[in-house]
Image (cartoon, rainbow, N blue to C red):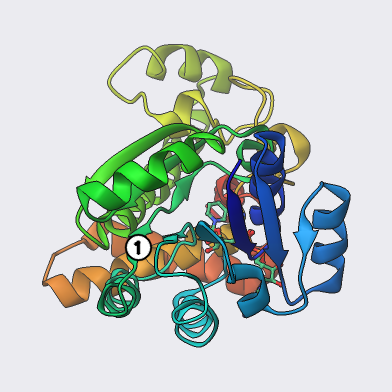
Amino acid sequence: MSKIAFIGLGNMGGGMAANLVKAGHEVRAFDLSAEALDAAKDNGCRTFMAARDAVASAEAVVTMLPNGAIVESVYIEDVIGHAPTSAILIDCSTIDVASAREVAEAARAAGYEMVDAPVSGGIAAANAGTLTFMVGGSDAGFARAEPILARMGKAVIHAGASGSGQAAKICNNMILGATMIATCEAFQLAQKLGLDPQVFYDIASKASGQSWSMTSYCPVPGVGPQTPADNDYQGGFATALMLKDLKLAMAAAEDAGAKVPMGERAAQLYDEFARTGHGGLDFSAIIRAL
Ligand code: NAD
């Protein structure tokens, strides 16, 4: 059993922390929300009223927070200098590559090992312990983080040096955003050309138009496996979160001087969709905007 501090017990972090408790760890939880802390307590976590108290004496610190600015402030103000330097620091939030590298550098300068470990998989995978982790950091940092992450996921992959986990995550989600829109467009056009959506699915899912957006997350209700489309686009991966990831990808592309015209167009379309009041719907609901 290890003492693991967990900061950020929201939709994702709540289930992840509960899985660490189930694995036999002492989980020292902190969140700004009293409701999130109460739920963590019910799940067997030990709760604290301040992040720095949660991380004191921890052997590992895991964070699952909304954005890069919050991750920076939590690490700089409450983790670095407050957790023992022997603690492995693991940030699972989805944030920009530059902030991930800056925080890891600050941690390293203070004597800590730190990895970025963003996830693929949503709330259901966080609860079930079936997330995929993409890890950026040194070999030594990966070796220390891997057994902890393995308790919360089905795959833990070392992507490279600091920031590489975030880079893998936003590149993956840029593919996802663009292929979802392309899949939605194709179903719309197929239908207008007189094809039955199920027949088009049966063909494209076994032909070169196949993709995860088509076969695992079909945007058309009643076609393919059970997906958010079958539940009026409730649940799943919110449009607002897809937009967040696409904006991170666009900022990274600009910094790196990469041309990403399809990603850019996908970001524009999701931005318009979110602005018209659809940010809470699953991202496959963009089929309604076409
Ligand atoms: P959420 O808003 O439900 O949870 C974030 C939690 O952080 C909240 O409980 C909030 O109170 C807490 N928090 C904010 N500032 C804090 C601070 N300074 N100190 C302590 N706690 C603080 O968000 P979520 O859906 O759990 O997402 C968390 C991260 O995971 C995000 O970076 C998101 O992009 C990423 N992610 C989410 C999903 C998803 O499907 N929800 C999927 C993959 C990745």
Residue 110 position in % (x across, y down): 32, 79
Which residue is outermost to the left?
257
Q: Can you identify the residue that label 1 sits on?
A: 114
Q: Nearer the viewer, residue 105 or 54?
A: 54
Q: Residue at x 34, y 53 (%)?
A: 174
Residue 15 position in % (x across, y down): 70, 46
Q: Residue at x 77, y 53 (%)?
A: 45
Q: Residue at x 52, y 61 (%)?
A: 61
Residue 183 appears in view: yes
Residue 80 position in % (x across, y down): 44, 79
Q: Nearer the viewer, residue 26 or 200?
A: 26
Residue 175 appears in view: no
The secondary structure type at the circle numbered 1 is strand
Q: Quadrant of the N terminus?
A: top right
Residue type at mark 1 is Met
45 w.r.t. 154: above or below: below
- Quick check: 159 left or right of 115? left
Taking the image as four quarters, which one is ligand 1 found in? bottom right
Q: Nearer the viewer, residue 157 or 243?
A: 157
Residue 252 position in % (x across, y down): 25, 70
Q: Nearer the viewer, residue 133 or 144?
A: 144
140 w.r.t. 228: above or below: below
Q: Residue at x 25, y 49 (%)?
A: 140
19 w.r.t. 56: above or below: above
Picture quadrant where residue 132 is located: top left
- Quick check: 230 left or right of 201? right
Q: How many marks?
A: 1
Label 1 neighbour load within 10 Å: few <14, some 14-19, many 20+? many
271 w.r.t. 12: above or below: below
Picture quadrant where residue 88 is located: bottom left
Instruction: Find out if the beta carbon at label 1 lies less than 8 Å from the nearest ligand 1 atom.
Output: no
